[in-house]
Amino acid sequence: MSGGDEPVPAGRQQPGDTAPGDQPSEAGTLHGITGYVIGLLLAVGLSAVSFWIGPSHLVWAPSIPVALIVLAIAQMGVHLVFFLHITTGRDNTNNVLALAFGILIVFLVLTGSLWIMANLDRNMRPIDEIMRMQR
Amino acid sequence: MSAAGLSAADVNAAVPFVPDEGGPAPVRIVVGFGFWIFLISDIVMFSAFFAAYAVLVGNTAGGPSGMQLFDLRNVAVETACLLLSSFSCGLASIGAGARRTGMFQAAMAVTAVLGAAFLTLEIREFGGLVARGAGPGRSAFLSAFFALVGCHGLHVSAGLLWLLTMMAQVWAKGFREDILRRMLCFSLFWHALDIIWVALFTVVYLMGTTP
């Protein structure tokens, strides 16, 4: 949605929004390729660190899962910005809002399932014990 | 600001209606946004598979765990294939935007080869697991593993068919507006698969082999 607080420049073809995945219209071919190259380099670097960090003994072992999750989230951000062109520009608001809602649902599904199931696992007696009690 | 003493007509006059000069959004915007919504719901579906996997990962029923089963070298090659194919898919969409048939078809062909290589490696891995008696029926952990990774593999297979269709359509019909819209959706789909793979190799393979 166009915010309405700034006049839309005349002669621009798409005054309001950007489709997800669309390059900014003023970007040329070379500029577009540069963006993908930067994205690829960042993604390769983050992947390489992810694979390297486990076998190497440079990181305190209990922190490795947290480090892996942080690296994965960073890499997803790189993919979103450089490959899918989801940015914080004002012409991209619809796409970002849809993404934010999706992330909320993903977060609820993941934490909700893990929380509830871990709680049940801790507090329920083993199933064979329940069977014996019913006899 | 208080509305007391102001009629509804006054309030409306104070905030002039600004017509949207653009009219209805261009079809490309609507199609892209709609497909983006589909992709997000697809990711929500994957999150349910991820949740099931995370809950069941410890329930190996006396069978092998990920530590004994996963071959990280294989996973690293798969990751490289998918990442490079994402890059070449980006080049293909730049080629389509610039109406360069040669660049588009070459980049799409590279994408297809890398995607097929990924699928081959994954199918070989699954075959090896089943041959070792670690099929989806062995334990809850393995059921969840095959469901999650297999679902991603099915998406890649569908994407590969779509990719070949796009190459054929551009070859037969050229860079028409509707073909370019399909290409936009395809590139979104392919990049989203790569995002899911990032979550997958981290949660399943890397965290599964961390002591």
Image (cartoon, rainbow, N blue to C red):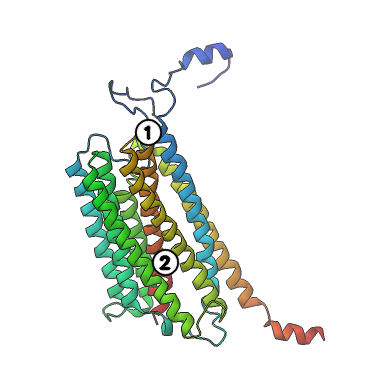
The answer to the question of whether label 1 and label 2 lie on touching residues, with beta carbons closer than 8 A, is: no
- Residue in the picture at 50% in, 60% down: B47
x and y percentages locating residue B32 in the rendered image: 41, 40
Q: Residue furthest left?
A: A30
Looking at the rendered structure, the kind of residue marked 1 is Asp
Closer to us: B61 or B10: B61
Closer to us: B9 or B132: B132
- Residue in the picture at 21% in, 53% down: A37
Label 2: which residue? B200
Mark 1 burial class by Cα count in 10 Å: few <14, some 14-19, many 20+: many
Look at the image and tell me in which quarter the C terminus of chain B lies: bottom left
- Residue in the picture at 37% in, 63% down: B198
Q: Do labels 1 and 2 share a chain?
A: no
Q: Is mark 2 on a helix, strand or loop?
A: helix
Is A93 on the left or on the right of B96, as rendered?
Answer: right
Question: What label does residue B16 carry, if any?
Answer: none
Label 1: which residue? A17
Above or below, B30 against A96 in this view is: above
Asked which quadrant contains residue B195, the reply is bottom left
Above or below, A41 against B135 in this view is: above
Q: Mark 2 lies on which chain?
A: B
x and y percentages locating residue B125 in the rendered image: 41, 76
Looking at the rendered structure, the kind of residue marked 2 is Leu
Q: What element carries label 1?
A: loop
- In this view of the protein, can residue B54 be seen by the observer? no
